[in-house]
Image (tube, grey):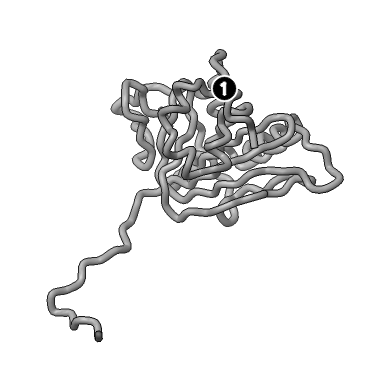
Amino acid sequence: MPKKEEVSNSTTTTTVEAAAATPEAQPSATASATPGPAAPFDMAKVPVSNVQLGAFPYLALPNGYKPGSEKTLEISRYPVLVGDHFQWVEGKVYDASISNIDGKDFSLYELQKNIETLVTQAGGTKVYEGKPTSETLEAIKDARQAFDDSVNGLGGGTVQVYLIHQQNRDIWIQMVANDSYGAWGIVEAKPFQASAKLISAEAPKPAQ
């Protein structure tokens, strides 16, 4: 896992800048900004993808790489880095570490290039690349415990964030990697739908 203490305070690169939404271009209803002065991400800056995708999590690792620990949550809140702050996205989340198979050397460049090419083929766009500051990471400390791979390791490598923006859904891909390890989270933004129900007053009581 990337070393947690390796946190950068250097300048980062934002490919698609986070900006305040205008009345003509509101951000996705399923994504809300981190509390504070940071502006919500402007979806109007991202081209729409018409590529037909398969089943969730939609993307597979390149040859020579495999997921280590992994989990899928039907609904959760996941922080994606969009410039100088994190934005919370609610939806279905896939979280996994990335390792090389036996006999294969881990290559940071190869992994990043493969994922970028794959996302581009899916009509996606890179929205951020860089390293979060220690102050930025402090704002998501609860999520770092919830997502031990793709969020907890954000301070130990270069972070790349992509967005596949389609007419009926938004898919966020956030990967962190260094020269020996990687992890990624894939989030399909969707609103929460409660499955819990009130018991009717007329319903019979369960048998003792």
Q: Type of residue at label 1?
A: Val
The N terminus lies in quadrant: top right
The C terminus lies in quadrant: bottom left
Quadrant for residue 123, please give it.
Answer: top right
Which residue in the rendered view is the most extreme toward the bottom? 207
| Above/below status of 34 relative to 53 | above
- Crowding at dot 1, Cα within 10 Å, few <14 / some 14-19 / many 20+, comes out as some
Q: Horizontal and vertical percent for residue 174?
A: 56, 36
Q: Horizontal and vertical percent for residue 69?
A: 62, 50
Residue at image mark 1: 7
Instruction: Answer whether residue 159 is visible to the viewer in this image.
Output: no
On screen, residue 129 versus residue 203, left or right, reads: right
Q: Secondary structure at mark 1?
A: loop
Q: Horizontal and vertical percent for residue 97?
A: 63, 44
Query: Is residue 174 or residue 42 the one in the foreground?
Result: 174
Instruction: Answer whether residue 155 is visible to the viewer in this image.
Output: yes
User: Residue at 37% across / 28% down in the picture?
Assistant: 40
User: Residue at 29% across / 63% down in the picture?
Assistant: 196
